[in-house]
Amino acid sequence: MAFRRGSGDGEVAPYVAPDMGAPEALTAFIDQGSEFEGKLSFKNTVRIDGSFKGEISSENTLIVGEPGTVVASIRSCNVIVSGEVSGDIVATERIVLHKTARVDGNITAPRLVVEEGAVIEGCVEMGAAAGASKAKANGNGKTVDVEPVSAEAVN
């Protein structure tokens, strides 16, 4: 079972992403206050609440928790972001950006879920072939430029 910080009393609550079912058990956890630099490759679910710099490749799910800061190129099946990511994200299945997410880089995935409040500074490529095409580097997806919009502009 994956975890998210509780109400601030040290409690850790179960985490289930919208429409994704329960992620598999955590393989690794980089906790808040920890720093890691290099190449991270894994087959199950990894959560980062600390700081990571380098490259990440996964055959399953990467979770960037709200206190997490990642400066890396990311390739994974599923990516769930509540913290900050600087670098391109390529997912073969889905990317979920929670309201506290901030991504400075390009996003490529067949499906993208964005909660109100999330910020993307980069291009978004999505559609049925997007994740697979980027993974195979033949670029058959659609590209959309995305700019953050303030709440006042929407009203």
Image: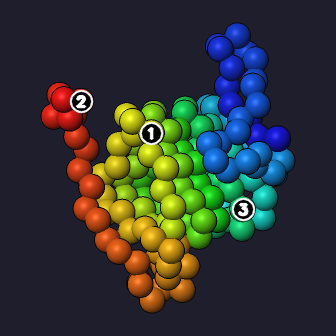
Q: Earlier in the sequence, mark 2 or mark 3?
A: 3
- Which amino acid, by three-letter code, is at mark 1? Glu
SS assignment at label 2: helix
Disc 2 target residue: 151
Could you tell me if residue 16 is visible in this image?
yes
Q: Is residue 43 left or right of residue 5?
A: right
Could you tell me if residue 101 is visible in this image?
no
Please report the residue visible at 78 percent of the width from the left and 58 percent of the height from the top: 44
The residues tagged by marks 1 and 2 sit, at their Cα atoms, a distance apart of 13 Å
Query: In front here: 130 or 64?
Result: 130
- Which amino acid, by three-letter code, is at mark 2? Ala
Please report the residue visible at 73 percent of the width from the left and 15 percent of the height from the top: 10
The residues tagged by marks 1 and 3 sit, at their Cα atoms, a distance apart of 22 Å
Q: Quadrant of residue 49?
A: top right
Q: Quadrant of residue 2?
A: top right
Disc 1 target residue: 115
SS assignment at label 3: loop
Q: Quadrant of the C terminus?
A: top left
The residues tagged by marks 2 and 3 sit, at their Cα atoms, a distance apart of 34 Å
Q: Is residue 40 left or right of residue 87?
A: right
Query: In front here: 55 or 137?
Result: 137
Q: Nearer the viewer, mark 2 or mark 3?
A: 2
Q: Earlier in the sequence, mark 1 or mark 3?
A: 3
Q: Residue 108: give x, y in percent of width and height.
A: 45, 67
Q: Quadrant of the N terminus?
A: top right
Q: Residue 151: give x, y in percent of width and height.
A: 24, 30
Disc 3 target residue: 60
Please report the residue visible at 62 percent of the width from the left and 31 percent of the height from the top: 33
SS assignment at label 1: loop
Badge 3: residue crowd in 10 Å (few <14, some 14–19, many ≥20): many
Question: Outermost residue toward the top?
Answer: 9
